[in-house]
Every structure is written in C-alpha cells, then in structure tokens.
Image (cartoon, rainbow, N blue to C red):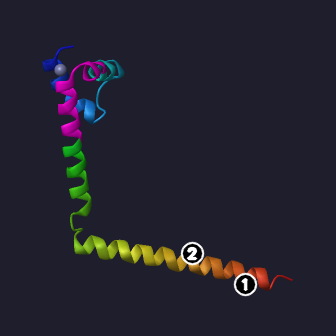
Amino acid sequence: MDCKQALMKLYNYLDNELSPEDYSEVEAHLKTCKKCFAKAQYERIIQEVVRKRCQTDPVPISLKTEIIARIRQLDNISQKNSSDNNRNFFFRP
Ligand SMILES: [Zn+2]
C-alpha cells in the first residue's frame, strides 16, 4: 500500500470502518511511513476534539427537563424500594 491508498482509507481506519484486511494494511503502512503516521495522529486528535465539543454542546431544555424528570422518577422508585426492604427487614416476624 502506498501513501495515496493509505490516506484514502485513513478516515475509515480511524472510524474503525475497514475490513480486518484493510485495517492491518493501513496499520502496517502507518508503522513504516512517518508522514502518514503523523497525519493519522493529527486526524485522531481532531476527531477527539470534535467529539468533546459535541459532548459539551448545550442540551435542548425540553430534553434536559425530561431527563431530569426521569432520573427523579427512578430515584423515587429506588428509594421506595429500599425503604420497603428496610421495613421488611425490621418488621420481619
Ligand atoms: Zn505514507
């Protein structure tokens, strides 16, 4: 595999979308080619930054309140269950 082929498959490589054969070919090229390795590292960092940006993006308020409401519901359920368990434990005949 030459640089052109490696770079063509680089994005799929980074996204883990290559077949095992292609993947090991790209990996083998990156091990022997500093230029493509540097490019791959660079792209990986970019991907990481983009991913982090997406995670910190503000969540729409309606979704947020819905999630909080569901978490509270779950909390109530688990609290109720645990207190029931405690009661059963203490008032067991
Ligand atoms: Zn190369």
Residue for badge 1: 87
What range is drawn magenta here? Answer: 28-44
Q: Horizontally, is 83 left or right of 64 in the view?
A: right
- Mark closest to the chain's N terminus, 1 or 2: 2
Q: Identify residue type, mark 1.
A: Arg
User: Where does residue 46 sit, x and y in percent of width and height?
Assistant: 19, 45
Residue for badge 2: 78
User: Magenta includes 30?
Assistant: yes
User: Where does residue 93 sit, x and y in percent of width and height?
Assistant: 86, 83
Label 2: state its secondary structure. Answer: helix
User: Where does residue 22 sit, x and y in percent of width and height?
Assistant: 29, 20
In this rendering, is residue 74 above or below 34? Answer: below
Query: Does the image show residue 78?
Result: yes
Q: Identify residue type, mark 2.
A: Ser
Tag of residue 33 = none
Q: Residues within 10 Å of mark 2 (few under 14, many from 20)?
A: few
Q: Horizontally, is 6 left or right of 27 in the view?
A: left
Picture residue at 21% right of the left edge, 51% below the top: 49
The chief SS type of the magenta part is helix
Callout 2: CB less than 8 Å from ligand 1: no
Query: Along the line of sight, which residue is nearer the eye, 53 or 84?
Result: 53
Give the distance between the C-alpha atoms of the residues marked 1 and 2, in whole angstroms. Answer: 14 Å
Query: Along the line of sight, which residue is nearer the eye, 17 or 26?
Result: 26
In this rendering, is residue 87 above or below 60? Answer: below
Farthest residue, direction right: 93
Q: Quadrant of residue 86?
A: bottom right
In this rendering, is residue 62 above or below 50? Answer: below
